[in-house]
Image (tube, rainbow, N blue to C red):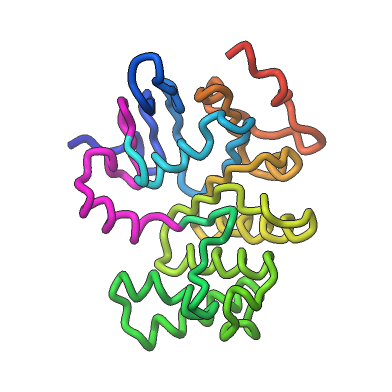
Amino acid sequence: MASSASSGTIIDLRRVSRCYGQGESEVVALADASLAIDQGEFVAVVGPSGSGKSTLLSLISGIDRPTSGEVWVTGRRIDALTENQLARWRRRAVGIVFQFFQLLPMLTALENVLLPMEINGFEAGPARERARTLLAQVGLTGRARHLPSELSGGEQQRVAIARALANDPPLILADEPTGNLDEATGSEIFELLAMMPARGKTVVLVTHDQALAARAGRIVPMHNGRIAPAGGWQPDRSSLRPSLNDLSTW
């Protein structure tokens, strides 16, 4: 089996399509998409609802499989893996941050962060110490014993980020992580994610927020299931150009 495009490329989508349904009811969620993302990049994927952003993340994470094309992540063609192989790969390679946090309500903040490590077979003592360290890194040292219902939205998302980092994955996928937060809290969560490339992580962020997207290292716009030509652009820090409202020519 051939390897991914290069040692520096962590995500390599090769003419990937994802269709749902058949015949007249067929919906093309992603159409002939090719995209390469290098290790350590911070990429913002932007576009209107229904443009294929979440489908893209689902394929990169191995939660979904393409109808056609190849999905290479961390040097492996993940769409060719069995379900068991894919589950083992995902536990090691990917951390996911969701819009609505997805914390287990009956577990404390510390226990939510511990859970991925327990599933991965970490020793209890080192795992608990790492969970405490991660909570400290996201500013929640004093909230470790609190249940999600006792935390603010911003605090819950910080727990979710710590959980995503628990198994030290090289890739962090964030699907609208600020979409359920006020502007100030959302900016704080964005800054936490923006620090990840300096720690050797690659971050792919899906967002509707053009101001936040403009602070990423690269913007990848999507429209009608298609990725912008040449895989996007580096943003103009004073504005988001070309305009995301003028994508009909793709």
In the image, farthest residue toward the front: 25
Position in image of residue 200 (x %, y %)? 49, 57
The reply to whether the magenta stretch includes residue 1 is no
Whether residue 110 can be seen here: yes
Q: Does 153 sit left or right of 162 as displayed?
A: right
Dividing the picture into quadrants, the one containing residue 235 is top right
The reply to whether the magenta stretch includes residue 70 is yes
Q: Does 180 sit left or right of 108 as displayed?
A: right
Give the residue drawn at x 34%, y 76%: 118
Q: For this rendering, which residue is in front, 82 or 21?
A: 21
Q: How many marks?
A: 0
Q: For this rendering, which residue is in front, 131 or 87?
A: 87
Above or below, comparing residue 230 to residue 57 in the picture = above
Above or below, comparing residue 237 to residue 120 in the picture = above
Looking at the rendered image, the quarter that the N terminus falls into is: top left
**Which residue range is magenta in the image?**
66-95
Give the residue drawn at x 36%, y 25%: 21
Give the residue drawn at x 77%, y 38%: 237
Position in image of residue 126 (x %, y %)? 39, 84
Dividing the picture into quadrants, the one containing residue 187 is bottom right
Above or below, comparing residue 166 to residue 98 in the picture = below
Position in image of residue 199 (x %, y %)? 53, 61
